[in-house]
C-alpha cells in the first residue's frame, strides 16, 4: 500500500474520488454480529480505513469507532473531513490511529467487538493480520468483516465502454498496480482459506452480481442485491474515481516526461464511446463485490 503514502500521490483525490459503500452494509454486519447471544456493540475497529469512508458510516452503530491506517497522510485527510451535505455540518468522534494491519499493538487483548476492512485486505500479510484479529477480538464474541469491490465492473448502459475500461486498467496501467492487486481481483476468496485454517466459524462469503462467480472459487453464495456497494456513477465521478487509482499514479510518475495524466486520456476515450453529453448525469454501473464475514 506504499503508493498511497508516497509524496506524489494525492490523498485528497482519493477522498473525493472513491465511492461510498451501501448504507445497508453496516446494518447487515451489525445484524450478523448480534445474532449471537452475548455479543455487544461497544468497539469497532475499521482497519485500513484510508480517509475514513467506512469509519464514518459506522458511527452511531457502535459506542466507539476506531480507524487505523498505515498512511499518516491518509489519516490527516480523514481527521479533517467535514460533511455538510445534509445542510448542517456533521461532526465525527472517531479515533484515528496510525498502525499497520499486522501490528495493532495499541489495542488490548479481547477489547474489540467487530473488525471491518473495506477494500483494503489485499494489502495485508494475511496470517499476521489474522493473528492480531484473534488477539484483539472479544473471545467467543467477536466478528470480522472483510469486504470490497473489484476495480472493473460493468457499464450496464454503455457496454461498449467495458473493453476500453479493461484495456486501461489491465493492459496500460496493469504493470503498475502495487502487490496485492490479484487478491482484490479474486474478491478476497483467498481469505476463505485463511479464516478456515485459523478456526473462525459461521463463515459466510457472498458475492454480487452472479457473474462475479468467475472471479472466485468455491464456498460462495450470491446476494440478492448489491449489499456492499450500490454507488451510482456519473461520467464526472467516474473520472474522479479512476484518477484516484494507485496504478494510474504510478504510471504517471514513470512517464512524467510525457506530461500527460493517463486517467484523463482514457476518461476522454470512454466518455466519447459512451455517447453521453452531460458528464453529471447518473448511469447504471454494476460493481463486482464481495463480503466475507465470520466469528471468532
Image: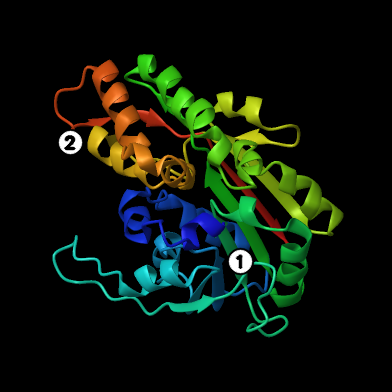
Residue 296's image quarter?
bottom right
The residue that label 1 is drawn on is 115
Front of the two marks 2 and 1:
2
The disc at residue 42 is none
Give the residue at x 49% y 43%: 247
Q: Position of residue 221 (x, y in %)?
A: 65, 35
Please tell me which residue lies in front, 214 or 220: 214
Against 22, is 111 above or below? Answer: below
Q: Residue furthest front?
A: 257
Is residue 296 shown to the viewer in this render?
Answer: no
Residue contact at pointers 2 and 1, CB within 8 angstroms: no
Rendered view: 164 above or below 58: above
Q: What residue is pinned by disc 2?
A: 280
Which mark sits nearer the N-terminus, 2 or 1?
1
The x, y position of residue 66, in whole percent, is 50, 75
Q: Residues within 10 Å of mark 2 (few under 14, many from 20)?
A: few
- In 3D space, how far apart are the residues under numbered discs 2 and 1 (Cα atoms)? 36 Å
Tell me where residue 127 sits by quadrant: bottom right
**Image point (37%, 35%), residue name:** 262
**Is disc 2 placed on a helix, strand or loop?**
loop
Amino acid at each position: 500500500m506504499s503508493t498511497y503514502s508516497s509524496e506524489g500521490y494525492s490523498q485528497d483525490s482519493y477522498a473525493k474520488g472513491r465511492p461510498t459503500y451501501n448504507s445497508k452494509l453496516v446494518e447487515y454486519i451489525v445484524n450478523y454480529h448480534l445474532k449471537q447471544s452475548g455479543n455487544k456493540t461497544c468497539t469497532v475497529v475499521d482497519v485500513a480505513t484510508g480517509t475514513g469512508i467506512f469509519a464514518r458510516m459506522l458511527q452511531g452503530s457502535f459506542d466507539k469507532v476506531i480507524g487505523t491506517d498505515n498512511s499518516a497522510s491518509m489519516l490527516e485527510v480523514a481527521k479533517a473531513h467535514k460533511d455538510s451535505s445534509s445542510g448542517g455540518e456533521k461532526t465525527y468522534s472517531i479515533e484515528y490511529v496510525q498502525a499497520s494491519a499486522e501490528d495493532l499493538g495499541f489495542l488490548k487483548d479481547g477489547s474489540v467487538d467487530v473488525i471491518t476492512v473495506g477494500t483494503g485486505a489485499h494489502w495485508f500479510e494475511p496470517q499476521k493480520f489474522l493473528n492480531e484479529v484473534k488477539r484483539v477480538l472479544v473471545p467467543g464474541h467477536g466478528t470480522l468483516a472483510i469486504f470490497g469491490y473489484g476495480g472493473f465492473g460493468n457499464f450496464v448502459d454503455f457496454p461498449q465502454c467495458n473493453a476500453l475500461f479493461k484495456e486501461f486498467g489491465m493492459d496500460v496501467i496493469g504493470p503498475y498496480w502495487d502487490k496485492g492487486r490479484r487478491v482484490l481481483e479474486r474478491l478476497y476468496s483467498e481469505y476463505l482459506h485463511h479464516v478456515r485454517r485459523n478456526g473462525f466459524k459461521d463463515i459466510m462469503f457472498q458475492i454480487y452480481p452472479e457473474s462475479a462467480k468467475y472471479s472466485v472459487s468455491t464456498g460462495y453464495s450470491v446476494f440478492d442485491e448489491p449489499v456492499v456497494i450500490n454507488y451510482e456513477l456519473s461520467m464526472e465521478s467516474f473520472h474522479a474515481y479512476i484518477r484516484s487509482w494507485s496504478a494510474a499514479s504510478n504510471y504517471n510518475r514513470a512517464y512524467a516526461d510525457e506530461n500527460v495524466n493517463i486517467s484523463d486520456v482514457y476518461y476522454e476515450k470512454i466518455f466519447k464511446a459512451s455517447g453521453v453529453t452531460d458528464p453529471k448525469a447518473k448511469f447504471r454501473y454494476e460493481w463486482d463485490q464481495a463480503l466475507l464475514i465470520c466469528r471468532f
